[in-house]
Amino acid sequence: MGERLLLRGNEVIAEAAIRAGCQCYFAYPITPQAELLEHLAHHMPRLGRTFVQAESEIAAVSMVFGAAGAGVRAMTSSSSPGISLKQEGISYLAGAHLPAVIVNVVRGGPGLGNIAPSQCDYFQATKGGGHGDYRLIVLGPSTVPEAGELTMLAFDLADQYRIPVMILADGLLGQMMEPVELPDPVDPESLPAKDWATTGAAGRDPNIVLSFDMDPNDLKRANLELQAKYRTITENEVRYEEMDTEDADIVIAAYGTIARISKSVVRMARKEGIKVGLFRPITLWPFPYEPLKALSEKAKTVLTVEMSAGQMWEDVRLAVAERAETPFYGEMGGIVPTPRAILSEVKKHVR
Amino acid sequence: MERSVIIAGFGGQGVILAGKILAQAGMNHGLEVTWMPSYGPEMRGGTANCTIVLSDEPVGSPIVDEATGLIAMNIPSLDKFESSVSEGGTIVVNRSLIERKVDRSDVTARYVNINDIARDEVGNPRAINMVALGAYVKATGSVPLDVVMETMAQAMRESGKDKFIDMNSAALEAGYNAA
């Protein structure tokens, strides 16, 4: 850790990728994540690493497939419409058990939408935006420093489980600046060898990396392997944060930018004597169902707040079931709810 | 204690840079800070604004319902954000471009001829953002002037613009003295 620097979320994700030993970055520009690409365009070539501004999003994610298959740490990034274009490649990465990091700095949708902050890609990220029975590990940073920490973690988890990992940020987190102490760089030599990678078959049998099997029984086995891996991840990698939940009657369930805004809401509500807490999933997949279920035994209300029509809300309701009320407050189209707007929703549920 | 300020003006008036320097100065002064820009089409020729939160605790929301401060560089900015200032807050009004008074009696208004000071006292019309920032830190005491000056100088050195340090220092001081 070094000095405190004032940096944008996009810059911190890019710099964390460098420090995580990302050797190859491929992307096509789009607002509001352009600074991420710019940072890597500036720094990667100077470090002797690979930066390619691809001719399209699909080309970029396919280049990630190639680099990851060759055993190096690789990343792509985009924003919502660009991430939609990458879905074919993401499914291929998942099917081929390839470690890779994909950053989505989400903007308003659907369609071309706009460039304002949104959380409307939660379904796409956590439920499988591409085809097939696959999952991504999905990490939802809430602050600029955490965006850096989770980017470092994303590369480690990707390698450990041979799985694509998505950083699900939003335009506000990408654009805002906050003090950050950048993590120490990883020594690429210290990383475990990838004996499955296509590194040249000299002196050994060829390795094959693909997501294709014409034999139904073999493809079934391949799917079972994926599912077994997803169960292991679900058991080991659930991450979340709780704030003031101990005696809370009302728990706000929120991730990312909305979770940090909700921290202000919790403080405001507590000053008024309202017992409010915050439950913040950090892994959006695997979703922290069990901890939230436990909270819902005590709380009367679990209020989900999102910049969407209610996407994570479905997972919250799966966790809470009938144990507590599960209202929802959301804003769409790039509107960011203010602390006071969320507080007034909270007050509707005070009994 | 938490302070927040919206800095708003035309694209090209330097409000984004002024906000960055204030946030950086706050950080250098040991505060927790966030800097949030308006981004998008308004950045290109229309109005631009950014919100800075300065706090002695970790900052929750980087967006605020009401800011404790506003620097209004032009009429549309005052019209848009005057009602977004909290009771007892401070508004720095660029009197060179804004003829009207602040409509509210529950805030402190500081009227500063920002463009005139930049042109006549500093000798550079582009120094308006630093004149405004100097006026704001005087009016609110949020970050000491010398910390802002050193932060500005550091930012200029890092971007290879050392030659603007003296001019910007003079602008910060002139704004400080005028508020």
Image (tube, coloured by chain):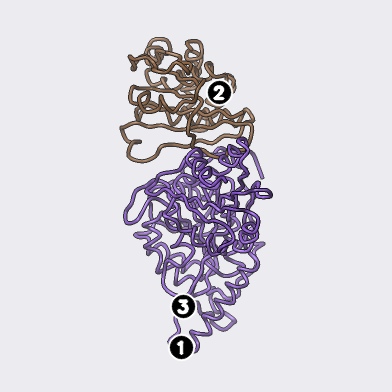
Chain colours: A purple, B brown
Q: Chain of mark 2?
A: B
Report, in whole angstroms, how far the alpha carbon at label 1 lies from the one at label 2. Answer: 68 Å
- Up/down of B86 relative to A23, above or below: above
User: Dot 2: within a 10 Å radius of its alpha carbon, few (fewer than 14), some, or many (20 or more) residues?
Assistant: many
User: Dot 3: within a 10 Å radius of its alpha carbon, few (fewer than 14), some, or many (20 or more) residues?
Assistant: some
Q: Nearer the viewer, residue A180 or A291?
A: A291
Report, in whole angstroms, how far the alpha carbon at label 2 lies from the one at label 3. Answer: 56 Å
Q: Nearer the viewer, residue A297 or B82?
A: A297
Query: At which x and y percent is residue B102?
Result: 39, 17
Amino acid marked by disc 3: Ser
| Circle nearer the viewer, 1 or 3 | 1
At mark 1, the secondary structure is: helix
Q: Chain of mark 3?
A: A
Marks 1 and 3 on same chain: yes
Amino acid marked by disc 1: Pro
Q: Earlier in the sequence, mark 1 or mark 3?
A: 3
Amino acid marked by disc 2: Val
Report, in whole angstroms, how far the alpha carbon at label 1 lies from the one at label 3. Answer: 13 Å
| Circle nearer the viewer, 1 or 2 | 1
Say which residue appears at 49% left-offset and 66% top-offset: A67
Q: Which mark is residue A49?
A: none
Residue farthest front in this picture: A351
Residue that carries the numbered disc 3 in the rendered image: A211
Residue that carries the numbered disc 1 in the rendered image: A216
Residue A156 occupies quadrant: bottom right
| Residue A333 located left or right of residue A168 | left
Query: At which x and y percent is residue A110?
Result: 34, 56
Residue that carries the numbered disc 2 in the rendered image: B148
Marks 2 and 3 on same chain: no
Residue B113 occupies quadrant: top left
- Up/down of A240 relative to A215, above or below: above
